[in-house]
Amino acid sequence: MAERSHRPAPHPVVRRDPDLMERDLDVIVVGAGFAGLYMVHRMRQSGRSVRAFEAGNGVGGTWFWNRYPGARCDVESMEYSYGFSEELEQAWEWTERYASQPEILRYINHVADRFELRDHIQLDTKVVFAHYLDSESSRESGGTKRGSNGSGRWRVVTDDGESWTAAFCIMATGCLSSTITPDIPGLDSFAGGLYHTSRWPHEGVDFAGKRVGIIGTGSSGVQSIPIIAREAAHLTVFQRTPNFSIPAHNVPLASEIQAEIKRDYQGIRAQNRERAAAFGIHWGPAGGLTFDSTGDERREAYESRWRMGGLGFISVFADLLLDKRANDEAAEFVRAKIHGIVEDPEVAALLSPDHVLGCKRPCTDTGYYEAFNRPNVELVDVSRDPVERITATSLVTGEREFELDCLVLATGFDAMTGALHAIDIRGRDGLTLVDKWSAGPITYLGLGTSGFPNFFTITGPGSPSVLANMVTAIEQHVDWIADCLEFMRTQGHSTIEATATAEKDWVEHVNTVADMTLYPTCNSWYLGANVPGKPRVFMPHIGFPPYVEKCEDVAAKGYEGFSFQDR
Ligand code: N01
């Protein structure tokens, strides 16, 4: 298969109406998912003019796009929700332990309405470029409507050719939003239904009576396979790498449980913020070090976490991602479970991962392994017999040809940096973000990067983001940015920029922490290893509480590690 360069394709030329007035704002936000919505809300509260641009024709980000069958959050609904408004959290009723995509999307739309955010969000609009206007570039581009040369502001141009300027540019583009379509010869020639899990048709897909193939067995594949298997005449699963999956044990959410949490919702959220991933309060504490317990105690601990279900399994013992021997034992427990569920031992063996448990994000499923006991489901190991090409009617491996009516790509994302690099972002002196990050993302706290003044990333690389409850991580970032902007206003600062020293130290710190764990031992999207040519760098920061402490300390010290300029 041809190796795709990770370097983004040249950005499209935009249509530009020369008479179009440039519109001038305090803040531009890119994206209207959980992050963009809350950022808009905070900016409105502080009286700033703000506009969010969103590529989709609805709000919701991840939850707008990922509508594949079975799409559901792997963090429990009572935790995967905003905590900034007591009225909101008391008013909203979740119906299931793990919320489905439609329910989360309803919630996000409710938030947009409740806080009157829609007038500040422009849908169906892609940001094509975002350029910082220093004195040189603003002279070249003819200045702004403000009459000055516009220097010190961001110019953002959208795919309909509109041009906007703002003092601050805030990226709320999501960590898992830039879809990967694999570079398989002939893919474009497939004449049947071709679907990517993260770009699922809004009207749904009817698989009844169809021969369906699916490539990919990460969370998206694992969630959709049992449902497609029930609908389709036949489902062929093309698996390159098996993934660990823990049963979700999803159930309707009892109103008593909901009421009990709501009695002390803020207290529970505060306790969650003290946990490494900022969720999972009801799992109880991690069970100490693995080998401090006896064999019987360990077996009972694994069993009990398996019965509880979900991602809590990987915090069964505190050293699961620190000690390979501890990890091996827990992984072996899961492999035994797979063999206990899947009737054909050869299929069970193929479904059993041999990498470190948790170094790729484990999946949370409903009936995944059970699906392989169905007579209409076949598992094909494309690591041994790789996919060679797609024809109009089939998928061809080295040894076989599979006639298909539909092909589903559950092939994942160019995580954490992909959505940023899809936009032509330029900072001081025309420096592009792509060039600056050519050897991997360089940020200070995952919030800012030197050379890009007044530019923030919400849950950017170098922050806990995907290793934490995303909604909590988003709120922490948005609050930090909003407080920082307030600080600048009171101090009379016009620009803020991370220093090169601070970001260098931070990147080193993020990597040092990661290297103390087993995370870097396998080819995960955390490392960019799923994208050919992408630099192999561990991107998220491990551990929510120490990260928050650092952010608070930086702010308390007058935003140490950032430099300011005054008007
Ligand atoms: O993507 P993935 P995803 N030929 O990258 C395979 C979040 N999420 O969309 O491992 C054959 O995990 C690839 O194989 P390999 C969650 O954080 C959350 O499933 O590279 N196979 C892999 O099996 C998750 O981790 C939820 O060998 C190819 C799969 O495609 C993240 O999103 C639900 C291939 C991609 O798996 C990403 O999940 C869904 C090729 N050419 C997603 N190219 C929940 O909240 C790729 N693959 C539950």
Image (cartoon, rainbow, N blue to C red):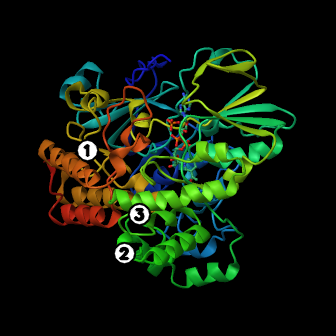
Distance from Cα at disc 2 to Cα at disc 3: 17 Å
Q: Quadrant of residue 346?
A: top right
x then y, percent, for residue 355? 45, 47
The amino acid marked with disc number 2 is: Gly
For the residue marked with disc 1, what is the amino acid?
Thr
Tell me the mark number nearer the camera, choosing from 2 and 3.
2
Mark 2 surroundings within 10 Å by alpha-carbon count, few (fewer than 14), some (14 through 19), many (20 or more): some
The span from disc 1 to disc 3 (Cα, nearest Å) is 21 Å
- The residue that mark 3 highlights is 277
- Judging by the rendered image, the residue that carries numbered circle 2 is 288
Q: Residue furthest left?
A: 501
Q: Position of residue 35 (x, y in %)?
A: 46, 52
**What residue is shown at x 60% (from left), y 39% (from top)?**
198
Q: Residues within 10 Å of mark 1 (few under 14, many from 20)?
A: many
Which residue in the rendered view is the most extreme toward the right?
A: 209
Q: Provide the secondary structure element on which disc 2 rests.
A: loop
- Ligand 1 - quadrant of the structure image: top right
Please name the residue that numbered disc 1 is placed on.
Answer: 443
Figure quadrant of residue 21 = top left
Q: Is residue 479 above or below residue 346?
A: below
Is residue 60 in view from this perspective?
no
Point out the frontmost of discs 2 and 1: 2
* Mark 3, other Cα within 10 Å: few <14 / some 14–19 / many ≥20: many
* Residue at screen point 28% across, 29% down: 438
Q: Earlier in the sequence, mark 2 or mark 1?
A: 2
Instruction: Kindly tell me whether mark 2's CB lies below 8 Å from ligand 1.
Output: no
